[in-house]
Amino acid sequence: MSRIGKKPVALPQGVTARIEGARITVTGPKGELSRLLPADMTVGLDGDTVVVTRPSDETRHKALHGLTRTLVANMVEGVTQGFAKSLEIQGVGYKAEPKPFGVQLVVGFSHPVPYHAPQGIKITVTNNVQVKVEGMDKELVGQVAAELRNVRPPEPYKGKGIRYAGEQVRRKAGKTAQAAK
């Protein structure tokens, strides 16, 4: 039995869940999230908790059981606290500028790179090199952070580029002078 899938998801004060077939909608102080869950799983409300059950002990159902419960738990956490990812920009002249549409990155190309933030994502910039991506949907926050990092990933020789806060970049030794023959 899936240990994660067995645990019921508690709904905190001010959070409501609505289940219509395979779709669950969670509403809280930060907003509303809706998601279509795997059709095999049975999701039900038991008082102020959401319970996920599976139809059989097949391997596929066991995997979906834990996944479905985690997706519901992430929705509940998203509408109560939200999610955030931090990025750092390193390199001489590299910076990020906040814009009404999202953020504009200057990262060593011949042109600035605009990034348009999707609906529900807030991007803040501090000190021109610290970028914070915030939102209710954990999946969307992670996707936006990955897309921003992918504009200029950190390179292994000088370490320049966009990295997650606290990410360790493995550095390589550069070319060494070849001995004269």
Image: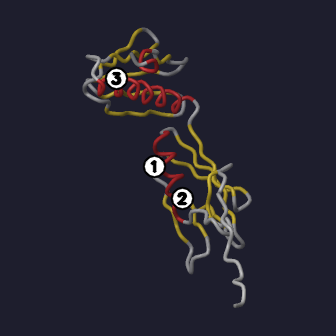
**Label 1 to label 3, Cα distance in Å?**
33 Å
Mark 2, residue position: 148
Where residue 78 is drawn, which disc sits there?
A: none
Residue sitting farthest toward the front = 181
Q: Amino acid at mark 1?
A: Gln
Query: In terms of depth relative to the viewer, which is nearer, 44 or 8?
Result: 8
- The answer to which quarter of the image holds residue 98 is bottom right
Residue type, mark 3 in image: Lys
Check disc 1: other Cα within 10 Å, few if <14, some if 14-19, many if 20+.
Answer: few
Residue occupying the point 55% across, 58% down: 149
Taking the view exactly as shown, the residue that stands out farthest to the top is: 47
* Numbered disc in front, either 1 or 3: 3
Residue at point 47%, 18% (across, down): 9
- Residue 117 rendering spot, x and y as whole percentages: 49, 55
Circle 3 SS class: helix
Marker disc for residue 62? 3
Mark 1 / mark 3, whichever is N-terminal: 3
Q: Which residue lies at the image location 52% right of the left edge and 67% below the top edge? A: 114
Tell me the distance, in whole angstroms, between the alpha carbons under discs 2 and 3.
34 Å
Residue found at x 51% / y 61%: 150
User: Residue 16 in the image: x percent, y percent?
Assistant: 45, 21
Give the label on residue 119, or none: 1
| Quadrant in which the C terminus appears | bottom right
- Position of residue 39 measured from the top left corner of the image (x, y, whole percent): 25, 27
Mark 2 nearby-residue class (10 Å; few <14, some 14–19, many ≥20): many
